[in-house]
Amino acid sequence: MRAVSQKKRNSTASQGILLLIILVFCIFPFYWMVTTSLKDQIVALQTPPAWVFEVTFGNYTEVLFKDGVWENLLNSLIIAVCTTFLSIFLGCPAAFALARFEFRGKKDLWFWFITNRMVSPIVLALPFFLIVRNLKLLDTHLVLILIYLTFNLPIVIWICTDQFRAIPRDLDEAAVIEGASQWRIFRSICLPLAAPGVAVSGIFSFIFSWNELMYALVLTRNNAKTAPAMAVSFMEGYNLPYGKIMATSTLIVIPVIIFALIASKQLVRGLTMGAVK
Amino acid sequence: MKGKVRRRTIFAFLGPAIVSLAVIGIAPLLFAAYTSLHNYNLTKLRKVKFIGLDNFTFVLTDPVFWDAMQRTFSLLVIVLPLQLLIGLGIALLLHQPGIGLLKTLTRLSLVVPMATTYSVVGLLGQVMFNIKYGVVNQLIGFIGIEPVNWIGDPENAFIAVAFWDVWQWAPFCALVLLAGLTTVPSEIEEAARLETPSWWIVLRHVQLPYLIPGITAILILRTADTLKLFDMVFTMTRGGPGSATEFVSLMIQRIGFRAFDQGLASAQALILLVVTIVLSQLYIRYFYKEVQQ
C-alpha cells in the first residue's frame, strides 16, 4: 500500500517537473523578447547575454516617438479593425444562408471557402501588386483592408456557420408561421443568439490581420505601413538595434496574446476551421 | 422549410460575400494567368511580350523551383513528426489527473507560441540564435557545447528554422490532440485502465481512434501552412545563407519582387495554387462529408 502511494507521489512529481519544463519552453522566447526590449543597446550586445541588468524604457520611447512606430501601430489597428468589421458584415449573412438554406452549388461554395484558407498569400500578392499599382492605390489602407478579406471572410463564414447551425430550427419555424421574413429571422433571432461565436470569429480575424506581414511588405511603403513591416525595416544594416526591434515586437505581440488568451477555448476550433471540436 | 426560400433571398444573403471574394480573390488570379503567359518583367514593362507556355515549361524544368519544393517538403517531413510526437506527449501529460493549477498554467502557456506574430518569431530567431549575442549559444554553452553559427551556416540555418517551427506549432498539435483525448468517453477509458496498466495499450487501442480526426487535420493544415511559410523565415534568414532556407513561397517572392520577373513568378504561383487545391480537396473529403452528401 505504501509502495503504491510512494509511486503515485513520484509520478505526480515527475509530471509536475515535465509540465514546468513545457511551460518554460513555451514562454521563454516571450520572456527574452520582453527583457531584451528593456535593455540598453550596449547591454543588448553583451557577450554572453546579460540576465540581470538595469531596466530602461528608452527603446520604447525611441521607437514610439522618434521612429514613429505609433503611426504604424495605428495603421495596423485601423486596418485590422476595418477588415474585421467588413468581414463580419459580409460574412454573417452568408454563414446564415449556408447554415439554413438548401441550394445548388453549396458544396462548391464550401470548397472554395476552404481553398482560401490554404492558398499561399504569394499567389495573390503578385497580381494584386500589379493591379493596385496600375490603379495608383499602392500604400493605402484600403488595399490591405480589402486583401485581408481573402483570409478573414472564410474564417468568419466558417465559424459563424457552425454557430447558426447550433441554433434550433424550431425558433425560426415559429417565426415563419408568424410571418417573419428570413432577414428578420436572421437579424432578430439568430444573430443575437450567435453573438458569442461572431465575436470569436472577429477576434480571429483581428489576430490574422494584425499579424500579417507579406502583403504589408509588398503593398505598403510609408503611409499605410503596418507595425510588422516596420519592425522588419529595423533589420537593415550592421549593428542591429536589438532593443528597438524587440520593443516594437513586444508592442505587436502583447495585444495578440491577450486576444488569443481570451479566445483560447475556441482557438483550436478556429485554427482548424471547425474540423476539431 | 426546405426549398421554400426564394432564390432572391438566398442571393441577398450570400451575394455580397461571394461577389467581394470573387473580385478580390479570383480576378487577380486571372491577371496572374495573363502575366504567366507573358515575358513580364517589372523593369522592362515596355517590352511585355506573349510567350505562350514558355514560363511554365521553364518552371517545370527549373532546378531552382524543384530545389525549393524539395526543401519545403524536407522541412515538412522533419518538422511534422516532431510536432506530432511532442504534441502528443504534452497532450497525454495534460490529460492525466494531477496538479490542477500547474496544468491550467501550462495549457495557457501553449497558446503563447502559436499566437506570437510569425514575423516576430523570425526577428526573435535572429536575436536568440545570433552567434555572438544570442542566448541559445549561451544556454548550450552551459552543457559544454561550443558556440554554433546558426544563421550564417546553411545547414544550421535550416536547423534553426526547423526548431523554431517546432516551437511554434508543437503546442498547437498538443491542443488539438488534447481536444481529441477529451472526446474519449470516460467509462471506456477507465475500464481500459482497469484492464491494463500500460498507457501504450490504452493509447493504441482506446484513445487513438478518437485522435485520428485531429491528426488528419494537423497533417493537412501543416502541409498547407508549410507551403505558405514566409513571414518567419523572411525575417529570420531571408531564405539564406545562399538558398539554404529558401522555401517555395520565399522563392516566388524573390523572383517576383527582387528579380522582378513577374511572368515567371506568376507561373510558379499558379503551379503552387494547383498543389494547394489538390490538398484542400483532401481536407474536404476527410472533414466535411456532410456537405459532400
Image (tube, grey):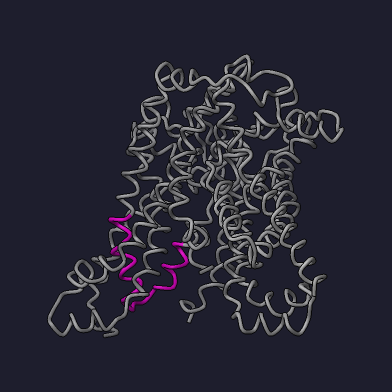
- Picture quarter containing residue B176? bottom right
Residue A220 lies, with reference to residue B107, above or below; the image says above
Find the residue positioned furthest to the left.
A179
Which of these two is toward me, A167 or A186? A167
The magenta span reads: A88-113
Q: Does residue A220 appear left or right of residue A191 in this picture? A: right
- The residue depicted at 71 percent of the width and 61 percent of the height is A12
Q: Report the magenta stretch's main SS.
A: helix
In the rendered structure, does residue A92 fall within the stretch colored magenta? yes
- Picture quarter containing residue A223? top left
Which of these two is toward me, B13 or A8? A8
Residue A157 lies, with reference to residue A144, above or below; the image says below
Residue A74 lies, with reference to residue A99, above or below; the image says above
Which of these two is toward me, A18 or B159? A18
x, y percent for residue A30: 58, 38
x, y percent for residue A275: 52, 68
x, y percent for residue A139: 38, 30
x, y percent for residue B267: 58, 46
